[in-house]
Image: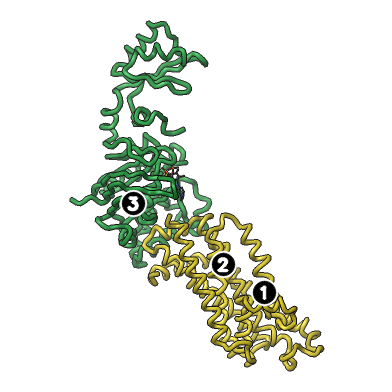
Chain colours: A yellow, B green
Amino acid sequence: MQVPGALRVVEANAIAYRRVWKGSAFSSFVTPALFLVAMGLGLGSLVDRGAGAPGFEDLSYVAFLAPGLLAASAMQSGAAEGSFQVIAGMKWTRNYHSVVASPVGTGGLVGGHFIWTGLRVLMVSVIFGAVAAALGAISPVAALALAPIGILIGLATVAPMTAFTANRENTEALTAVFRFGITPMYLFSGAFFPITQLPDWLQSVATVTPLWHAVELARRVALGYDSTLPAWQHVGYLVLVFVVGAALTYRLFSRRLNV
Amino acid sequence: MQPLVEAADLTKRFGDFTAVDAIGFSVASGEVFGFLGPNGAGKSSTMRMIGAVSPVTSGRLRVFGLDPATDGRRIRSRLGVVPQDDSLDMELSVEENLYIYGRYYDLPRREIRARIEELIDFAQLGEHRASRVDPLSGGMKRRLTIARGLINRPDLLLLDEPTTGLDPQARHVLWDRLYRLKQDGVTQIITTHYMDEAEQLCDRLVIMDRGRIVAEGSPRGLIETHSTREVLEVRFPVGELEPAGPTLQKTADRVELLADRALLYTSDADSALGEIHRLGLRPESALVRRSTLEDVFLKLTGRTLVD
Ligand SMILES: Nc1ncnc2c1ncn2[C@@H]1O[C@H](COP(=O)(O)OP(=O)(O)OP(=O)(O)O)[C@@H](O)[C@H]1O
Ligand SMILES: [Mg+2]
């Protein structure tokens, strides 16, 4: 994987992004604002009257929600970059084929794709953090500290997602992954409520999702709570998922583009 | 001088299927070299191997004296590629497409800017430089793809079916552009299944069929070697062509019976036509023309090029 070629791909993505950046930045801003206000403050005013989940009795719901929701939003962005963007490059515009015919090659294409996604989720995380801090849900320092976790979960999502999309011929399977994978993960990986509220078997499922590890890390970093596992294990798991997904992506891209 | 491309026993297999079957050829600097063949002949597969995007299954291939298996990146940096499908970024403008591609070749921004001016001029896209690619006509997209392939001043331009799907006028505009490149000394490899395109553009070509090379030479040389000077095409009313076959055989050196007409290969078409009438046949229409590469292909493979 040559770094210069990968940077050219990042540059190309940035040029294409210029066309849509206003709409995209706006929705990165509005979505967390809506969620934090409606769920955190609105629903939270009811939740806070209850006893609170074990371990989080003293915390307001919006403070509980914000770090995990940031991770969940980064996951969604990662999933988007690894799905429709990829099938477009392979099939619709076939633009991946022209990258591979240039000196950039398949290594540069794959490297650039992941660096670009890292930048996109960084942007999403920073905007989310700023909105959450402005609403008083988290401290400004915590908002900054959460950005790297956003990148981690974004990459741990985009890599397996890209590998999955590499051989797809249409969007049917992608729609299914969003419906039966990304959305349930979004809801049940501990961002909205601790997974200890789930039945035992679902708890075991939740602990293998990358998002649960990111949520645990986020809450640890933002609120100073102990995570279920030591921080390095959560980080290690996310890095592992990214590395395996990225290696698989490279293999599958080569097999499709260099036949 | 060392050839730009040299292939010997070059083979490409997809699973059990052999798409390119032990072909050999070489392309010299400054030359326009063609692969003429029908659908599925193995033209694109060959081009993709030369372009160092598709690994060689077996045999030997050298591009600029380099081995694509180990020096792919260096080869690609000196090539211009016009793939069979345009693969442009539809959401971006004409200029942005050129700019991004220039960056893939690691060209400095300032140089790309200057190059874009020349190429937009060359591709006659001045009015559309800032417009998105999506709404452009097929011919304009094709010219843009060619311009994009020239951004790095390649030592060799690979054109895979440059005019397939274009209307006749757009084709002529494109041929004119390619001819200009040839005059500027740009070496080109062109694949096509149009015999007129091969005749117009190529200095030298190989005829490919089912993964094999069946003949090689200049367009004129191939016609002289494999066909007669003139061809008489005769049509008969429905049902009368087949019974006329044996009689027609007596009037020419060689006769090809196609579905709707007969082709008579002869050095003197007028006297062949006289002979046909003398033998009592009444064709619906008769046309005298010169031999083309289509006739060469028909003779060598027993099939027509475009079906
Ligand atoms: N990736 C692939 N996997 C399997 N078979 C392939 C693959 N690519 C090409 N082929 C087969 O190899 C043969 C040659 O294909 P190729 O695209 O090289 O032909 P071509 O001469 O360019 O034809 P066309 O005029 O249709 O572009 C065809 O029969 C095609 O179906
Ligand atoms: Mg082809």
Residue B42, percent across and down? 40, 44
User: Residue A55: x percent and y percent?
Assistant: 71, 91
User: Of the residues shown, which amino acid type is indicated by label 3?
Assistant: Ser
- SS for callout 2: helix
Any mark on residue B88, and which?
Answer: none
Which residue is label 3 attached to? B58
Q: Nearer the viewer, residue A102 or A238?
A: A238
* In the displayed structure image, the side of residue B85 where residue B200 appears, left or right: left
| Quadrant of the rendered image containing residue B299 | top left
- How busy is the neighbourhood of tag 1: few (under 14 within 10 Å), some, or many (20 plus)? many
The chain letter under disc 1 is A
The x and y percentages for residue A134 are: 65, 86
Query: Which is more N-terminal, label 1 or label 2?
Result: 2
Task: Please name the amino acid that badge 1 sits on.
Answer: Tyr
Q: Which residue is mark 1?
A: A186
Q: Nearer the viewer, mark 3 or mark 1?
A: 3
Tell me if I can see residue B119 in this picture.
Answer: no
- The residue at 33%/14% (across/down) is B270
Q: Is mark 1 within 8 Å of ligand 1?
A: no
